[in-house]
Image (tube, grey):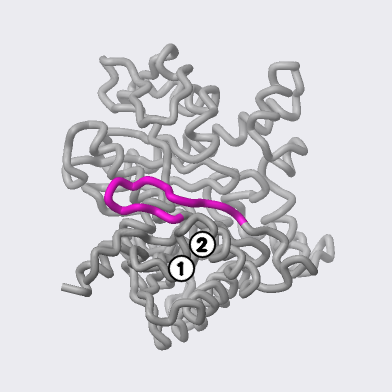
Amino acid sequence: MTDASRVLVLNSGSSSVKYQLVEMADGSRLGSGLVERIGEPDCPDHTTALTRIADQLADRGLGLDSPELAAVGHRVVHGGSRFTAPTLITDEVLDAVRELIPLAPLHNPANITGIEVTRKLRPDLPQVAVFDTAFHTTMPESAARYAIDTETADRYAVRRYGFHGTSHQYVSRGVARLLGKSPEAVNVIVLHLGNGASASAVAGGVCVDTSMGLTPLEGLVMGTRSGDLDPAVLLHLHRVAGFSMDEIDSLLNRRSGMLGLCGDNDMREVSRRMAQGDRSARLAFDIYVHRLRKYIGAYYAVLGRVDAIAFTAGVGENAADVREAAVSGLESLGLVLDPALNSVRSPEPRVVSREDSRVVIAVVPTDEELEIAQQTFSLVSSAAQ
């Protein structure tokens, strides 16, 4: 192993590529950016996008040919049941990720393309896949299995996988640091609330339940996704309304959630409209919070003992009104919010509960790119020893 101490983190989507170059010595960002509109004349494909990223870094003396670059860490959305940890990418691993495309048809193909192009640009450099689903593979079968015919479920890989795993892992460890304890000593409910939203129950650093399922559609109310829904709704819309499967898919993933309820999927705008007395915004907010409180209660029961609840991601970190509403009336469960602390805006991890709260309520900003970089660097470092 050389003294290389930098990791390039790539998140390749169907029409964009996000990147961050991380210095592992101190976690600092040496470069970051986003290339959008892939597939249009100005940027026809991922090869062009990644070449552009390499050029942007090279202009600052940080190119892909830098000897200080230790590895590239790729976000891969779906690892199925097979990939339970960060994995060095080989041809065999790529083949396995391709087999999982039916479980993530919008994400895995783009992730694969980003990997293939980067391997061509730097074939000598270790490439690591870090899976959104990996952290949740520790769930017991009682939490991961759906109550459908087991032969059918096994044949078609139907089970709860969960997503946002890098965020849940990063934040659960961050809560432990905030409490001055080891992750093994802490039970925490993590609430990742962004445009996509998910909850997890983490016992001693291990995920035992999570709200997203086979796909990122299940669970909490989200920006444009419905979350939990009676599956017969799909049958009803198909049989009675004549909706096709594609139309139902679009409805539930793109035209539901906060957008479907009130026309806005930005919680800041929803809060502004509520302050002006907008009834549809208020109802959407109340539905969002009601679902959130249900999951807090459910995961309290799953864990038995809860040391902390952590809010993270765009809404969780910034929407004080959501945090307040989510724990309001739960004092009997040991959740007592401090209004003054809750109103403070800060990029730092912080406690927002009162000193007499039995359960710590915390805000822990997530950093999925740093988590991917750390997992990538740890793997390539150990492999070289």
Residue 30 highlighted magenta (yes or no): yes
Q: Amino acid at mark 2?
A: Ala
Tell me the residue that label 1 is attached to: 64
Tell me the residue that label 2 is attached to: 58
Q: Is residue 346 above or below residue 45?
A: above
Circles 2 and 1, Cβ within 8 Å, touching? The answer is yes
How many neighbours does mark 1 have within 10 angstroms: few (below 14), some (14-19), or many (20 or more)?
A: many
Range drawn in magenta: 21-34
The residue positioned 34% from the left and 63% from the top of the image is 68
Secondary element under disc 1, as helix, strand or loop, is loop
Q: Is residue 147 left or right of residue 45?
A: left
Q: Is residue 47 above or below residue 297?
A: below
The residue positioned 24% from the left and 38% from the top of the image is 176
Which of the 4 image quarters holds residue 145? bottom left
Q: Is residue 233 left or right of residue 319?
A: right
Which of the 4 image quarters holds residue 110? bottom right
Q: Is residue 146 visible?
A: no
Which x, y percent locates residue 252? 69, 55
